[in-house]
Amino acid sequence: ASKYNKKEREYNSDINSKFNESIQGMQIIQAFGQEEKMKDEFEEINDKWYQVMRKYVILDSAFQWTFADFLQRFSLLLLMVYFSTQYINGVLGISVGMLYLFGEYVSRLYEPIKGTIQQIAFVQQAIAAGDRVFELMDMEKEDNPEEALTVSKGRVSFEHVNFGYTKDKHVLKNIDFTAEPGQTVALVGHTGSGKSSIMNLLFRFYDPQSGKIKIDGQETNQFSRQSVRQGMGIVLQDPFLFTGTIYTNITMDNPLISKETARQALIDVGGLELIEKFDKGLDEPVVEKGSTLSSGQRQLISFARALAFNPKILILDEATSSIDTETEEIIQHAMNVLKKGRTTFIIAHRLSTIQHADQILVLEQGEIIERGKHNELLNEKGVYKEMYEMQKKGQDLST
């Protein structure tokens, strides 16, 4: 039973995962006509769960009821045979009432036995579920010191950092650079070159295997992960909005951020038209994931969210990829005003958005192969120049 219970919990988890995946990706599934394929995959997992539960139910029924009843009736049979033999041989005289009493004793004796067998089944289910919980609890905890990091200027330095999501394969190799306060540093490169991994390390979502990451001269791994992130703001490629209002999505319910601050943050990133468009302004309801808003509107709100927290370090993870050219120009103008006093990191495929960056780092297979300003890199006639000309050629063809 323990083996079946453990398998049942695993398959039940797989079923829930498949449900979640199907619901989240319903539009893609329908757009590409994959309904039958998803149905077959679900039925395969569901059938495995059914087969395991079928075996468990048969085993549970056999031992909890059939086997226990068999023992009870077999004991009654032995009792009757014994008294009958004694009575026939004249050894023992017994009344019908006394015989009934002994039979009742045997029946009552097996009631707690049945209850015990039933409880054992529940215990086995609890053990199987508990094992999965304890596996998670027994995992090695992340190192998270209690001391808080204070970000005063926003100077960021990576010193010979090596990192891999698995120990046997490094995705970042000997990353070494410094971003001075107020500078804009752009990370460019092909998909998989390690741009987002650098930001994951900066936020302490992960820690490097070797090397040091410092903010204002302080090693980030010596401070709590939460305090490291407090001085940072981030705008992701795929903005995530929560159910609530535009205001609550900008402030994240932080009581220290006033409504006027949130409004000004949205205006600074070019969202004045967004406020005026809705009758309720900042109090306009936002449904799950902001599905009633356009991708550009969601990105503006996400951008305003980062700015409202007034971070010393700002990270734009391909933040302009989901908006149109006009909105991109608005954000670029706002950034030229707002990045003063902030260290800004930009991860972008569109090189037109980073031409004014103070420092451009070109990554390839986890290594920095070129660094410098836009014009300097063009003069080097390397990978950056090749990427820039390819994009420019593509834009010319599209027009």
Image: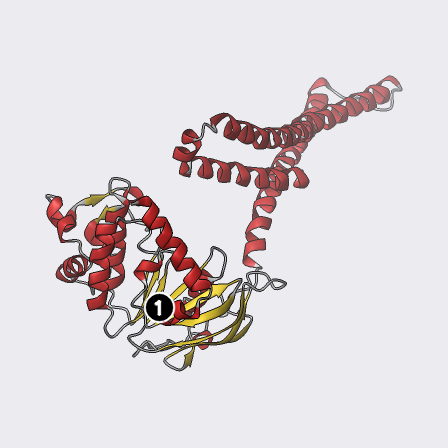
The reply, left or right, for residue 129 in relation to residue 322 is right
Q: What residue sits 39% from the left and 67% below the top?
A: 378
Residue that sits furthest to the bottom in the current view = 217
Q: Which residue is mark 1?
A: 374
Kind of residue at badge 1: His
Q: Quadrant of residue 178?
A: bottom left
Whether residue 373 is visible here, answered yes or no, is no
Total numbered circles: 1
Circle 1 — which element?
A: helix
Q: Quadrant of residue 199?
A: bottom left
Relative to 350, say whether 174 is above or below: below
Q: What residue sits 36% from the left and 80% below the top?
A: 216
**Residue 216 vs residue 85, the one in the foreground:** 216
| Disc 1 packing (10 Å; few <14; some 14–19; many ≥20) | many
The reply, left or right, for residue 328 in relation to residue 52 is left
Residue 11: image location, x then y, percent: 58, 38
Residue 19: image location, x then y, percent: 47, 35
Q: Quadrant of the N terminus?
A: top right
Residue 77: image location, x then y, percent: 77, 22
The reply, left or right, for residue 391 in relation to residue 119 is left
Residue 172: image location, x then y, percent: 52, 66
Q: What residue sits 32% from the left and 69% below the top?
A: 357
